[in-house]
Amino acid sequence: MKLLALAALTTLVSTAHGADTSLRVPSCPAVASTTFTTAIPSGDPCPETKVDLCYTNSSLSLVFTAHGEKNYYFDPTQGTNDAIWAYEVVEAFMQKGQDDPQIYFEYETSPGNVTYNAFVYNPSRERKAGAPFDHAFVTNPFADGFAVATAIDKRAGTWTSTSTIPLALFNGENPKGTTWRMNFFRTITNATLFPDQMLCGWQNPGQANFHITPAFGTIQFV
Ligand SMILES: *[C@@H]1O[C@H](CO)[C@@H](O)[C@H](O)[C@H]1NC(C)=O
Ligand SMILES: *[C@@H]1O[C@H](CO)[C@@H](O)[C@H](O)[C@H]1NC(C)=O
Ligand SMILES: *[C@@H]1O[C@H](CO)[C@@H](O)[C@H](O)[C@H]1NC(C)=O
């Protein structure tokens, strides 16, 4: 009985927190990949999302592949830095350094190939009620060195966004040997569910709140 209970608890914990909390990322063209398949905060199954990462001296390459997609639900009237997060997106939160960040970059792309690019100021590290919580947008990302390309494959039930993020944004060029903190997310909704969303993520913050930075995983550029 004791053994069974322990096994059940172990399963619950590993489901809730995902398999790996850290990832070693090589220089391109090699890539490191991770996947996530669980909902935040419940740990229920989510369609798989794969993230491939590698770096050059000046940029981070980030490829999201969303599997099991049925909806491709986005607002085609939205443009750069609009509230695309209310629909379906994939997201990366990131900051250079090992600490639980109080300022970090929030990057999102939609199946419509629109991006959201903002630094988040979150001094409570958990978007605590009453604490400051602010955004500074990167207003001209494609002039700043960002790139994105998004491909939808409805037959396969996938969409893939391939992004380039300039490391100078973080004083982070030549990242070999540095440690960063990141988390990855995906939202799923459709016309019936909207404005409700299924939230899926790499590291589960334990609340329906992506902005809990002690939960971010660790990325080592090797
Ligand atoms: C990248 O940076 C390293 C270290 O500064 C340097 O040795 C290398 O030549 C650079 N590579 C390119 C392609 O710029
Ligand atoms: C996606 O958006 C970027 C930036 O505007 C653009 O360069 C690219 O051609 C777009 N289209 C696709 C299919 O990725
Ligand atoms: C939205 O998703 C839910 C849950 O999968 C489903 O029951 C519903 O039919 C979907 N609505 C549309 C418009 O696709």
Image (cartoon, grey):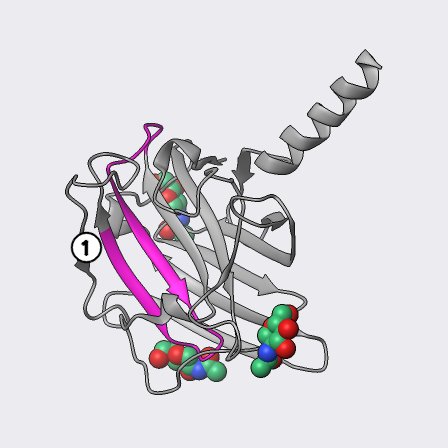
The verdict on residue 113 being magenta is: yes
Which residue lies at the image location 32% right of the left edge and 41% below the top edge? 95
The amino acid pointed to by label 1 is His
**Where in the figure is residue 190, as x and y percent of width and height?**
52, 76
| The image quarter in which residue 11 lies | top right
**Where in the figure is residue 31, as x and y percent of width and height?**
58, 50
Residue 78 horizontal side relative to residue 207, left or right: left
Residue 47 horizontal side relative to residue 168, left or right: right
Whether the residue carrying mark 1 lies under 8 Å from ligand 2 is answered with: no
**Where in the figure is residue 200, as x and y percent of width and height?**
54, 53
The residue identified by callout 1 is 135
Seen in the picture, residue 50 relative to 207 is either above or below; the reply is: below
Which residue lies at the image location 56% right of the left edge and 70% below the top edge? 160
Q: Quadrant of the N terminus?
A: top right
**Where in the figure is residue 222, as x and y percent of width and height?**
50, 35
Seen in the picture, residue 85 relative to 180 is either above or below; the reply is: below
Observer able to see residue 71: yes
Judging depth in this view, the residue of 50 and 30 nearest the camera is 50
